[in-house]
Amino acid sequence: MTQKEKLVVIGNGMAGVNTVEHILKLAPNQFDITIFGSEPHPNYNRILLSYVLAGDSKVDDIVINSYEWYKEHGISLYTGETITKINTESKTVTSDKGTTISYDKLIISTGSNAFMLPLPGADKEGVIAYRTIQDCEYMMEAAKNYKKAVVIGGGLLGLEAARGFLNLGMKVDVVHICDSIMERQLDRTASKMLQDKLESQGMNFLLNKQTEKILGKDRVKGLKFSDGSKVDADLVVMAVGITPNVQLAVDAGIEVKRGIVVNDFLETSIKDIFAVGECAEHRGIGYGLVAPLFEQGAVLAKNIAGVDTNPYEGSVVYTKLKVSGVDVFSGGQFIDGENTKSIKIEDEFSGIYKKVLIRENKIIGAVLFGDTSDGSRLMQMIRNETDITGFEKAAILQEPGENGNAGSSVADMSDEEIICGCNGVSKGEICSAIKEQGLTSVEEVKNCTTASRSCGGCKPLVNDLLEYTLGDEFDKSAQKETMCECIDLEKDEIVTQIKEKGLSHVREVMSVLGWKNDEGCSKCRPAINYYLGMVNPEQYKDDSTSRFVNERMHANIQKDGTYSVVPRMYGGVTNPADLKKIATVAEKYNVPKVKITGGQRIDLLGVKKEDLTNMWEELDMPSGYAYGKAVRTVKTCVGEEFCRFGTADSMGMGIQIEKRFERLNTPAKVKMAVSGCPRNCAESGIKDLGVVAIDGGWELYAGGNGGVKLRKGDLVSTVKTEAEVIEYTEAYLQYYRETGVYGERTSEWVERLGVQHIQDVLADETKRKELCGRMDTALSVLKDPWKEAVKSEKIQKDLYEVIEAK
């Protein structure tokens, strides 16, 4: 039996482990593999830390390879253990815990360290970098006790960190030494648009500021700048850059400049020692973005496995900002020069800016803001140095095939080119998986290869690869979005099966339809529960265990473990008696904060779990459903009753609507508004359904959203009477309930189905009556959850009883 070679990898990050993944595919039995990582975690996707900080993902969600993966492939993993010495003579490495391992081949993938400005006071408590899970957890913990953060650095990482602080409820200033943000990736136009967008989200910028010192005794209290000005801060995050982690290589006598010097095959100056990723310097360049390290890893893996490979000749880098509601893409060169020309589209109304830079009839760079759907295609053209002679220039910013734009094809890409930059999946891997696994949809490719699993920006390319690989067998119409990884069926298929097979329980659905995971997941279980209730409202018994915690508790859990209680106030209208009652209850239960919500309701914040049912009983008011995927509020202006401009009774109309649809479960939360005139004081234009009074009638606007993805509603109907408003609203909401995907807001639903289609459905009297009939049934079975909890000792014991630890 041939003895395996010993491969040791220093660094358990994305570059080193991605290289190992390639090696396992190329030569699965060639090496005994050992990996050392300083962090106490399995391999995780560092570039998705922003999603964790922003609250969009959990730490477990960004783990790339679990401990089971290492075990499955026979890899010896040492986490929380740092290699401190490489002996190139004996070919061994030694860790800080005394572990010594010999190697035949050694990969150094020690990454980089966050650069900390050597400012006076930088050692104070509360001054940190933003680089690791530990940093992320520290920031989230700090947000519980402190309210003001300052991020030094207006680059990609700094802005993502700042957005995360906003999500954590902190005020945040971004300090930047330049007069524009992301100046290394964006031109001034895009930078200004980005700044305006982030300021509208609550971020404050202090530009042209050079930090002189960090103030405070033991803990940071603020910053002082070179111009003498100051700013307060409870927490300071430095996001000003990274430095390659090379000391280990320096001590071992390996050639190091700024990074560990490697040739085109990732070989260092010492035989059998390689370097990959952010710690490496190739042709004088060190890369701090993820795609280049994956490209390096693919070449290094082939080199180590003895497979012929083209050399690594450097990377054309690109960047996407990972901030909710802000789409920014930058690739290649983006600043105009003497020998460049540019094509630009700037739509100030829609907040879209696109710029393509061209030199000698080749696209050399692009900047996209507001709509980044062209990013992957343009990046291909940049990489391929596509000659655009003969292209209609204005059509370059349109999809291939439109208006004479030949665009660039995935067929022109090499197998090594990375399609999914987030997860390091190449064209070759995807094409192989399509052929070998018989994949036919983007969802199947995602589940099999992880491509498009993270930001989803590469989905169009994955779709193109399916078409390219399958040829005539590719069925565009068959592309589907499965509910989750637990099942290969999409929403409509599951709903159809529930109806046809008469399924009536969550576990029954999973069992009969062949769920891969017996317990389901947090994505599919609530969805099944919703679909079952939507299909059979009269027969189905709600499965509270398949609901999220807020919906189980019928109150919003807050970050300190307390809850917020929102009594319903129809149309945002109340009276002195109810206000007195709320005040009395708030005082009795020591509610620490009483707040008026954006939906014109009163939010009682900081309520203890054990006080919830008693409070509800004493309030004796319906639940405002501020926690649920359900109809929440109907906001109103004062209308004709008090306003000089009002043309209709907006408060009365809003109260009618809210009383009609309260407690109604929907695919996602639904907010509505009624305005008494087109001045629109109730903000009806950005609600899931907005009702606006006009002379002689009402206009209904659908699919508006005032959240991070701002969307103006579309006019779907104009009616004459209040009764028609109710009828059309019934039909609209029921159609959304039946055709919406669980978790899909109406803003997304309207765009998916098309405004014209929804207009047609509402205009069809027969369909409208049928929808209204099914809505009647759905509404007839709804109960007040607070009253049920007050009456039921079992519910109180199961959900609200607090058992003190002894």
Image (spheres, grey):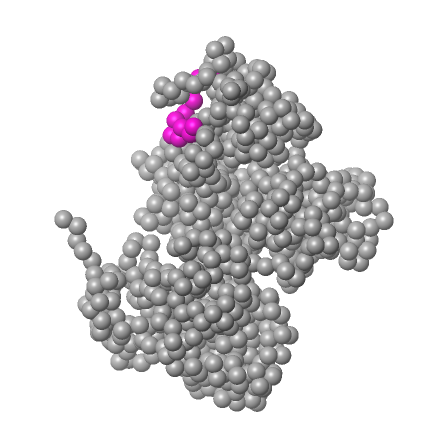
Q: Quadrant of residue 539?
A: bottom left
Of all residues, the one furthest to the top in this rendering is: 89
91 or 512: nearer the eye?
A: 512
Q: Which residues are magenta?
A: 76-86
Residue displayed at 34% across by 65% down:
544
Q: Is residue 130 left or right of residue 310?
A: left
Q: From where the camera sits, is residue 3 visible? A: yes
x, y percentage for residue 389?
A: 84, 46
Q: Residue at x 40, y 69 (%)?
A: 504
Residue 323 versus residue 489: which sits nearer the camera?
489
The answer to which of 578 and 717 lies nearer the viewer is: 717
User: Is residue 204 highlighted in magenta?
Assistant: no
Q: Residue 624 occupies which quadrant of the picture?
A: bottom left
Drawn side of residue 623 relative to residue 629, left or right: left
Vertical order, 682 against 304 (above or below): below
Residue furthest out toward the front: 1
Say which of 350 and 757 sits in front. Answer: 757
From the viewer's perspective, tell me whether residue 395 is left or right of residue 482: right
Place of residue 767 in the rendered image (x, y in percent of width and height, measured from the top left): 57, 82
Instruction: Determine the residue positioned at 54% across, 30% down.
Output: 28
Q: Residue at x 60, y 46 (%)?
A: 437
Magenta span dominant secondary structure: strand
Q: Hey, which quadrant is residue 619 in on the image?
A: bottom left
Question: Residue 342's spot in the image, x, y percent?
Answer: 75, 47
Question: Would you say residue 85 sits in the magenta stretch?
Answer: yes
Outermost residue, left side: 806
